[in-house]
Image (cartoon, rainbow, N blue to C red):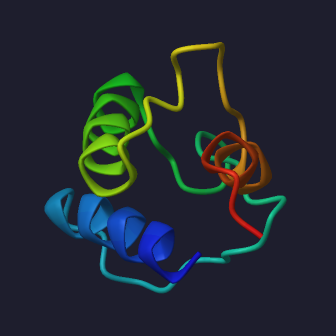
Amino acid sequence: MEKIKDIIASIRANKGIKEDFLFTENTSLRDDLGFDSFDLAEFTVKLEAEFGIDIFETGLVENIRDVKDKLNLK
């Protein structure tokens, strides 16, 4: 799960957002992290490069729990 947090932090840093963020299973990608469609696309590409899985292939993900479920992480 730490790798997911690192990927999110890098996307936020690229947007100039430096403050810490809440990272729980309920953290919403759009509402809590402020991800727009471009950020979600970048997130997908980075996760696929890291884990070899396209998390949006079988539907949308809304929060960190959804991401973990798609990646089969505990």
Picture residue at 63% right of the left edge, 13% below the top: 58
- Work out whether residue 35 or residue 2 is closer to the camera in this orientation and state it: 2
Q: Is residue 60 above or below residue 31?
A: above
Q: Quadrant of the C terminus?
A: bottom right
Looking at the image, residue 44 lies above or below residue 5: above
Coordinates of residue 43 in the picture (x, y in percent): 35, 44
Residue 59 place in picture, x, y as percent: 66, 14
Residue nearer the viewer, 60 or 34: 60
> Which residue sits at x=69%, y=54%?
68
How many numbered discs, if any? 0
Residue at figure coordinates x 52%, y 15% from the top left: 57
Pick the front one: 5 or 29: 5
Judged from this view, the residue extending furthest toward the top is: 58
Q: Nearer the viewer, residue 22 or 7?
A: 7
- The reply, left or right, for residue 32 in relation to residue 19 is right
| Quadrant in which the N terminus is drawn | bottom right
Q: Where is residue 6 in the image (x, y as percent from the top left)?
A: 37, 76
When asked about the image quadrant of residue 18, the answer is bottom left
Residue 19 on image: x %, y %: 41, 84
Is 72 left, or right, of 11 in this rendering?
Answer: right
Residue found 59% across the figure and 39% down from its top: 30
